[in-house]
Amino acid sequence: NFTMYATIVKDFVKTLVDYYGPEEVRTWYFEVYNEADLHWKFEDYFELYKAASFAVASVDSHLSVGGPASAFPLWITKLIDACAKEQVPLHFVSSHAYPTTGGARPAELKGLMAQVSKARANAGKYIPLFITEWNGVVDSRGKWHDGPDPGAFIIAAISTVAKEIDPLPVCIISSFRVY
C-alpha cells in the first residue's frame, strides 16, 4: 500500500524537521530503499520511490531524496529516466560496489572501478553520484574481511575512485582479527 507508506514517510520526515529544524535536515540525504534490485522489479521499486520522494518533498521541497541504492549500478539510468519522464524529485543517485570474486585482490580494483565508472556514466555530470556501500569484500563475516589485504585494497580504491564520485563511505569497518 504505497499511500500508507507515503503517509509513514511524510510523518517521519516531518518529525525529523520538527525536532532538528529544517536547516539541519536540509543537509541530509534521504536514500530510498536498499538493494531492491536483488528482489524487486524496477517498476515496483519506482512506485515505492515515487511515494517516498513525493512524501519527502511534501514536507520541505528543499530536502534531498534519491536512490536506488542498488546492489549494482544498473538501475541508475532507469531511475533518472523514470523520474524525468514522470517529474518525480531526484536529487542524487546511489549504488553499491563490491568486489565480485570474494577477495580484495589487485584485479578487483579494476572491477570496482568499472562499476563506479559505469555508475558515473549513467548518472551523468549534473547529478551527484553516491556509492553508499562498498568494501574490500562482499562478505563481512568471511576470512578476508578483517585481514590486511582488504585494508590495502580500501586505501588503493579510495585514491582510484574518489575523483569519480561524491561521498565514499566504507561499509562495515571493524577491527582486524588475528588468525
Image (cartoon, grey):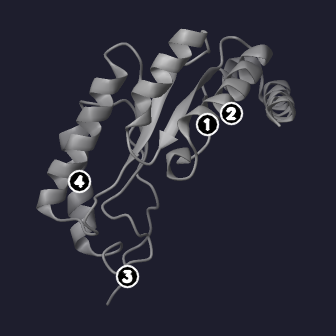
Q: Amino acid at mark 3?
A: Arg
Give above or below for 11 relative to 131: above
* Precedes in sequence: disc 1 or disc 3: 1
Do labels 2 and 1 touch, CB within 8 Å?
yes
Q: Residue 123: x, y in percent? A: 36, 23
Foreground label between 2 and 3: 2
Answer with the quarter of the image where residue 16 lies.
top right
Instruction: Give the label on residue 155, or none.
Output: 4
Q: Amino acid at mark 4?
A: Ile
Dot 1: element: helix
Check disc 1 and report the residue beneath it.
45
Foreground label between 4 and 1: 1
Check disc 3 and report the residue beneath it.
177
Dot 4: element: helix
Mark 1 residue crowding within 10 angstroms, few (<14) / some (14–19) / many (20+): some
Alpha carbon separation for disc pair 3 and 4: 18 Å
